[in-house]
Image (spheres, grey):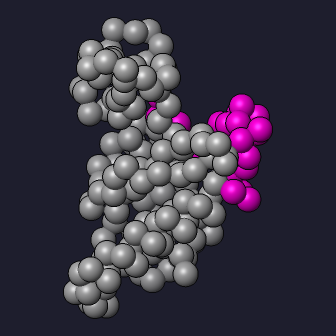
Amino acid sequence: FMHNRVFFRIANKAHFIAKPSNLMDVESVLTATHLMGDGDLTSSNVLETLPTAHKTIAKLELDYRTEGFNWQNNILPKIKTMIRELFNGMTAAFPAMGESKQSRALYGVDVMFEVESGGVEVKLPEGTFCPSNKSICDAYEKDEDLLRSYNNDVFSCLFLGSASNNITKLQ
């Protein structure tokens, strides 16, 4: 299953690592600024964690329309396929992972977009077992109903066998 709410973490500067010192520029290489602690960014234009919003998706579709960035018809299906292939591969390599009907787990998946000559491709830099929900909490800080809804969706799917409209079953 996959929760339909995704979060965008967008860097302030384009990713550029032509020389080793570029790796020290957190505004271009580190989008998970919640890992840094409070007060470590000196820029007033701090990096943001953005819940999926029509404005964010619309802006990406506008900025990358010539590359074929279409969330519903192109990008989201690629993400779902990538996640399904990840877990199919994991259970093939580690069969015990998929054997127990009693086992439940929450995974986090980081996805990056790469503009290539053939369009926009999705890349999987990391999958995490039992991820921190800190970024979700930060994103929902001003909207407790959204945070409660997300937590209820995940709990209901994992432990009650009930998937809300916010959850997609990956076949």
Q: Position of residue 75 (x, y in %)?
A: 64, 54
Does residue 38 appear anywhere in the picture? no
Left or right, residue 16 beside residue 66: left
Q: Residue furthest front?
A: 117
Residue 20, quarter of the rendered image: top left
Q: Position of residue 66 (x, y in %)?
A: 77, 38
The residue that appears at 40% across and 78% down in the rendered structure is 88
Residue 135, quarter of the rendered image: top left
Q: Observer-nearest residue: 87 or 116?
A: 116
User: Above or below — where is 136 with respect to 107?
Assistant: above
Q: Position of residue 5 (x, y in %)?
A: 55, 54
Q: Position of residue 48 (x, y in %)?
A: 47, 28
Callout count: 0
Asked whether 69 falls inside the magenta stretch, the response is yes
Asked whether 140 falls inside the magenta stretch, the response is no
The residue that appears at 55% across and 65% down in the rendered structure is 80
User: Above or below — where is 167 with respect to 68?
Assistant: below
Magenta range: 47-74
What main secondary structure does the magenta stretch of the protein show?
Answer: helix
The residue that appears at 47% across and 51% down in the rendered structure is 123
Does residue 127 appear anywhere in the picture? yes
The residue that appears at 34% across and 65% down in the rendered structure is 106
Q: Observer-nearest residue: 59 or 90?
A: 90
Quadrant for the C terminus in the image: bottom right
